[in-house]
Image: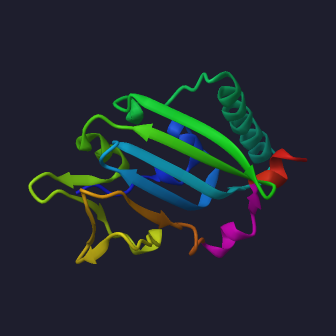
Amino acid sequence: MEQIKILFFVLSSFFGINDSQIAAEKTTVIISPKSQEIEIIQENLFTVIQSEKDTTSVLEQWKKLVNAEADNTYAWAKDLENFPIKNLTLKSIKKNIQPHLKLNYSTEKDLRVMGIWYNKEKNQFFINHIPQQNLKTTDGKLVENYWIFDGANTFSFTIEPFLQMPENYKKFKKPLNEIVNK
């Protein structure tokens, strides 16, 4: 069974940017099996800045994303090549940048690159339970090591993988809007 991917909470991983430094404290994922659509909403973007080089790197990554959004010229990650429709909108909500991604998939098998497995016989979606990811949902149920979701209905979950961030990184954690709005 697949593990849920960092794709959900590291913004630039959607665009194949190596050494991604922009992450989300909280990510909401909504999957609509009937329309074969995934919506991913990232909240409270942050980065870990330990040097001036880190700041420069984050600003370069951010500039690439903003320019690509303005021109609609994204270089999407190879993992997403089976998704025929991909869209990113960067929204400003209460002075925070909030990416909204929408992806359409062709078959349930396409979701495996995101760590979501589908059982056709049971019409259920499965995600490995990894306690450190702090997955929460009212639509699924935890059975042994798997979150199970009904394949006939839209379902959603949130993940907050940085709640237990090591203390030595917390002191370098900076909200992205502070870095890009200097």
Seen in the image, is 81 located left or right of residue 43?
left
* Image vertical order of residue 74 relative to residue 43, above or below: above
Q: Is residue 120 visible in this depiction of the protein?
A: yes
Tell whether position 48 is magenta.
Answer: no
Work out which residue is located at the far left of the displayed protein and give it.
121
Q: Is residue 49 visible in this depiction of the protein?
A: no
Which of the pair 160/139 is nearer the observer?
Answer: 139
Provide residue 37's location: percent of width, then percent of height: 39, 43
User: What residue sits 29% from the left and 75% below the top?
Assistant: 141
Seen in the image, is 156 located left or right of residue 146?
right
User: What residue sits 66% from the left and 34% below the top?
Assistant: 65
Tell whether position 171 is magenta.
Answer: yes
Which of the pair 18/140 is nearer the observer?
Answer: 140
Seen in the image, is 158 located left or right of residue 178?
left
Provide residue 77's location: percent of width, then percent of height: 47, 33
Provide residue 115's location: percent of width, then percent of height: 33, 53
User: What residue sits 63% from the left and 39% below the top?
Assistant: 89
Provide residue 49's location: percent of width, then percent of height: 75, 55
Q: Quadrant of residue 132?
A: bottom left
Q: Which residues are magenta?
A: 166-175
User: What residue sits 29% from the left and 76% below the top?
Assistant: 142
Work out which residue is located at the far right of the displayed protein and give it.
182
